[in-house]
Structures are given as structure tokens and as C-alpha cells.
Image: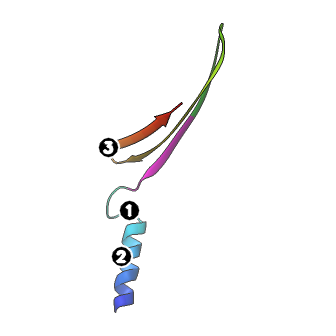
């Protein structure tokens, strides 16, 4: 019976039923202007309305 409970807990956690899953995000950009080429990189995570992002 204990094994069945643990399998159920793992299944619920894996499918996101305990809340929204954490989603990774990423962006890469490049722009060209008269002063040259510039690039950008951004990575982060999103969970529901909360978003944490690091840009360069």
C-alpha cells in the first residue's frame, strides 16, 4: 500500500497537478544599426505569474 501512495504522489507532482510547472524561458537577439551589430541573451524561469529573468 505504501508503494501505491508513493507512486500516486510522484504522478501528481510530475503532471503539475500540485501547481503550475516551472517553465524555462530563453531569448537571443541581434540588431544592426549604423554604429554596428549588437547581440543580446536572456534566460529565466516562469511559474504562474512570477517570472525571473537574467539578461545580458
Residue at the disc numbered 1: 16
Residue at the disc numbered 2: 9
> Which residue shows up at 45% across the image and 50% down it?
23
> Which residue shows up at 44% across the image and 38% down it?
53
Q: Secondary structure at mark 3?
A: loop
Q: Is residue 56 above or below residue 7?
A: above
Indicate which disc residue 6 carries: none
Residue 34 x %, y %: 66, 7
Please state the extent of the stretch shown in magenta in the rendering.
21-27
Report if the CB atoms under discs 2 and 3 are less than 8 Å apart.
no
Upstream in sequence: badge 1 or badge 3: 1
Q: Is residue 21 left or right of residue 30?
A: left
> What distance separates the C-alpha of mark 1 from that of mark 2?
11 Å
> Which residue shows up at 35% across the image and 55% down it?
20
Residue lying farthest to the bottom in this orientation? 1
Residue at the disc numbered 3: 49
Q: Secondary structure at mark 2?
A: helix
> What distance separates the C-alpha of mark 1 from that of mark 3?
15 Å
Amino acid at each position: 500500500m505504501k508503494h501505491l501512495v508513493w507512486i500516486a504522489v510522484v504522478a501528481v507532482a510530475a503532471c503539475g497537478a500540485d501547481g503550475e510547472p516551472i517553465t524555462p524561458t530563453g531569448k537571443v537577439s541581434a540588431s544592426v544599426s549604423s554604429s554596428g551589430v549588437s547581440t543580446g541573451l536572456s534566460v529565466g524561469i516562469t511559474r504562474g505569474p512570477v517570472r525571473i529573468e537574467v539578461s545580458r
